Amino acid sequence: MNGKVVKSLREAIELSGLKSGMSVSFHHHLRNGDYTLNMVMDEIAALGIKDLTLNASSIFDTHAPLEEHIQNHVVRKINTNYMSAGLGHRISEGLMEEPVDFRTHGGRPRDISLGITPIDVAFIAAPAADCAGNCSGKVGPSACGSLGYAFPDAMYAKKVVVITDNLMPYPLRGWSIPEIYVDYVVEVDAIGNPQGIVSGTTKITRDPVGLIMAETAVKVIQHSGLLKDGFSFQTGAGGASLAAAQFLKEIMVRDKIRGSFASGGITGYLVDMLNAGCFESLMDVQCFDLKAVESIRTNPAHQEISAMQYASPAAASAVVDKLDVVILGATEIDTNFNVNVHTDSNGYIMGGSGGHSDTAAGAKLSMIIAPLFRARLPIVTDRVSCISTPGRDIDVLVTQRGVAVNPKNQELMQRLKDGGLPVVDINELKEIAERITGKPQKKTRAGRTVANVIYRDGNVIDTIKSV
Amino acid sequence: MGKIIQRATAGTLESSDVLVTLEPAQEGLEIELNSVVQNQFGAAILETVQEVLKELDVQDARISIVDRGALDCVIRARVETAVLRGEGEC
């Protein structure tokens, strides 16, 4: 009956039948504290297996050893939704022969479920698991809360290996991923460093520019006509977005507005909103901080969702399509409202869509919050250096010097004007910024393709060139 | 006029600021630029620095500019301050 528990990672890999040329997958709920990806890839390399496709929902700086595995041809191809600047820079410099395929948090499960990106062996880091592989992220020394992104891997991979540092008696209570999908269970000393699992960036901004943008963002929501009972909401973990959530909470509490849900990556600020009665439920695909982890463990109204339920266009329905308002960030936005969250101002990879384009496509009001310029770099450009989310899915840009509404949404434009908001043309925002910063010299996009940006419907929406 | 007699600095390495360091030199201007926005504003920054030095009649100096994305007005102010300090004026 205990047949699934194997003594070592190496044994699990051997039993899984992993061979050169196959595909392995990982989820990223342990974020920059993750040990499992490196642990598994080192073992795979030691076994002499090569030419793998690595399908990881996100790749962080802690995964720097991947560079060596790429150079040694252990990894031949990467599919991911997000890549931080560490490996991103190296990819941009031409580290890999094959381009990286970037997807979205909805596009990844779509393509896994449709067999477009089949997975041979999925490795699931589990903060708690029993001997049959029932597992959960809610308890244990490496608790990370939701395991949302790991669901498609568990359900569709040919073989599934659960890696845990917290083997519990069968049956584990409150499992997320059930034993029916799991082939092997391995116990290790630690799957991650709790310090790195929860983000240090989820703090409200104190920057006056950020606070002005947050106040304006909330006014936009108020005047959009969407802020009423049943309201649904998502926001990223950026400082200004969190400040907006805080201001929104004050208004919802004051006016006794009872929303239906908040979704996405969940922070303590959204937990506070739930507890204050602003929402009936949280729909959580990933926890960003300890308060969120504690909440999903103890509060039944704080619900775990899979990546498919969150955002997959191949699912019969998904949470993002029920969103009223999403607040998103941008490294660049152009005068056609296309948004870049993949590359920095010099064209280096330093991010990815994550759920950006999924939520932008689903929400009734998709808002970008961004300052007119960061350091000396204007945010509004003629053409973003990489299209992550197409302009047709963006309704409004909020800056410290005015609000630009996508002309396709005339109703919103009128509502905001009537509400006395500082509505300006996006071209004018670009000019205001350039009067202050000067006009930046444009670098030509040359070089070979180092990454494809695949929109959630499966089409390549842009390519990223080598730097 | 514009004689740099001592090493002087102005500014910081904070984001959106610039650190200007000035040293006496025998002959001519030697400007070293290191900027996070080199690709977008490298030429504009050099132009501004040269302009301010000319205005202040500085002909011989070694100047290091470590720029963290400062606006043009900030660069002007920092260079001017460094020059005045280098001349022993403040």
Image: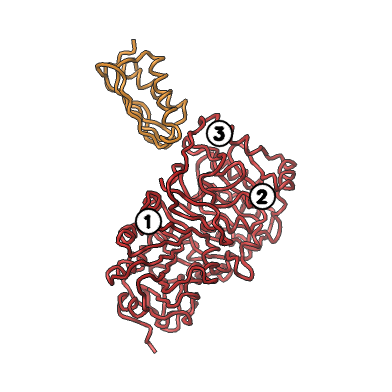
Chain colours: A red, B orange
Find disc 2 in the rendering and name its residue. Answer: A221
Q: Earlier in the sequence, mark 2 or mark 1?
A: 1
Q: Earlier in the sequence, mark 3 or mark 2?
A: 2
Q: Residue furthest left?
A: B26
Q: Secondary structure under badge 1?
A: loop
Find disc 1 in the rendering and name its residue. Answer: A96
Is A184 left or right of A242, judged from the image as shown? Answer: left
* Amino acid type indicated by mark 1: Met
* Amino acid type indicated by mark 2: Ile
Distance, label 1 to label 3, CA atoms, is 37 Å
Please tell me the numbered disc located at residue A244: none
Percent coordinates x, y for residue A463 in the rendering: 50, 52
Q: Earlier in the sequence, mark 1 or mark 3?
A: 1
Q: Is residue A231 visible?
A: yes
Is A368 left or right of B22, judged from the image as shown? Answer: right
Percent coordinates x, y for residue A268 in the rendering: 51, 58
Residue A259: quadrant of the picture: bottom right
Residue A435: quadrant of the picture: top right
Q: Residues within 10 Å of mark 1 (few under 14, many from 20)?
A: many
The chain carrying label 3 is A
Q: Residues within 10 Å of mark 3 (few under 14, many from 20)?
A: many
